[in-house]
Amino acid sequence: MLIRYWPKQTNVRFMNLRFAGAMFSVLLIAASAFLLATRGLNFGVDFAGGTVMELEKTETVTVPAVRAAMPINAEVNSARGTDNREIVVVKFGEAPADLLGDEFKALPADQQAERASGATNELIVRTLKEAFSLTDEDILRNDSVGPKVSKELFTDGITALVVALAMMLVYIWFRFQWQFSVGAIAALAHDVIITLGMFSLLWIEFNLTSIAALLTIIGYSMNDTVVVFDRIREDRRKYKKMPDREVIDLSLNVTLSRTLLTSGTTLISLFAIYFLGGPVLQGMSFALIFGIVIGTYSSIFIASALVLSLGMDFTKKTAEEVQGFTGVGP
């Protein structure tokens, strides 16, 4: 029904709003940079190291009781599991060597560093089992990551983001022109920085699934940007005497219905995952929801606006045009 009632032609003057859009983006980027510098990210166990343990909440297994039973400082909160059951989530780092026994203290320093995470996990499991008469089945989750592994995971995740941006820069440069490449990469960097700022503001856990979400956002935003750029190139060659601003507005209006319908249908699925998928998927689904919205915005007000500012030059004829084929649609 939306397609049926969507106007066949729109005439929104997007480029008249490009300076307002640029100011809005500058404010968002500045706020995100400030949050990341002062507040940082809520790193999950994947990047921060330590252990995450989940227990089924009962009359005896409660947040205050578990917090009181812990022999080391720990973050203890309540949450809902994937099956909507109430659970107690316990996050903790490595215990001091004095609590891990004489056998552990007798180990060389390098072996202590390797085994501290596992020894701490064993201490906490044993303590909680004794305090609440738990069995292995009552411990719903028990994930540990050592500091060395967590550092490698974080480095690899950031490397993946940087490589993805660099490869897309090369692709757009080869596929279009350098002006388009600069616009596309600026839009992608804009999306990633603001999404990270939102993670910091809402203190959403940042882990490996968040990196996967950011890579997905990059791909989705790039796909939308390429569709817009391709239409701009076609219209620029078709309407040679039309000013660049009018060409870009025309292209954006032609692709507007496709952009909104594609984003809208994707958001429907993501909202279902966010509200029904449980806490494990909420961080990733939120990042995708926010990223798709900001990515659609950046394709118009960042990527296209930068192309207008940098200029377009399609005076060189391609091989198809020399032979009489323009490759431009009706």
Image: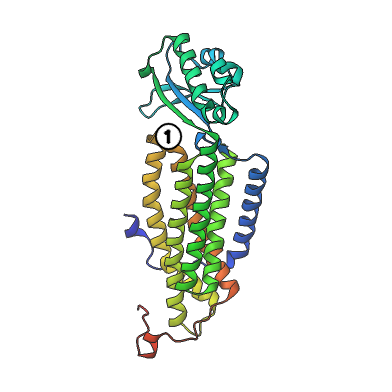
User: Can I make out residue 2 in this image?
Assistant: yes
Where the N terminus falls, by quadrant?
A: bottom left
Residue shown at 49%/25% (left/top)? 118
| Residue 237 in picture, x, y percent from top left | 45, 82
Up the image or down, 160 lies above or below 120; here it is: below
Nearest the camera: 35 or 141? 141
Foreground: 205 or 267?
Answer: 205
**Which of the 4 quarters of the picture holds residue 57?**
top left
Furthest-bottom residue in this view:
323
Query: Residue 143 versus residue 322: which sits nearer the camera?
Result: 143
Label tally: 1
Residue 223: image location, x then y, percent = 42, 61
Q: Where is residue 4 in the image (x, y as percent from the top left)?
A: 32, 59
Q: Position of residue 113 (x, y in %)?
A: 56, 30
Badge 1 element = helix
| Residue type (three-letter) at the residue carrying disc 1 | Val
Residue 205 at least partly seen: no
Residue 123, placed above or below residue 257: above
With respect to residue 185, does 319 lie above or below?
below
Taking 212 as reference, is 116 left or right? right
What residue is disc 1 on? 280
Q: Residues within 10 Å of mark 1 (few under 14, many from 20)?
A: some
Q: In which quarter of the image is the C terminus?
A: bottom left
Q: Residue at x 57, y 31 (%)?
A: 110
Of residues 178 and 52, which is closer to you in this image?
A: 52
In this rendering, the answer to whether 45 lies above or below 102 is below
Residue at x-position 41% and y-position 54%: 263
Colour style of the rendered protein structure: rainbow
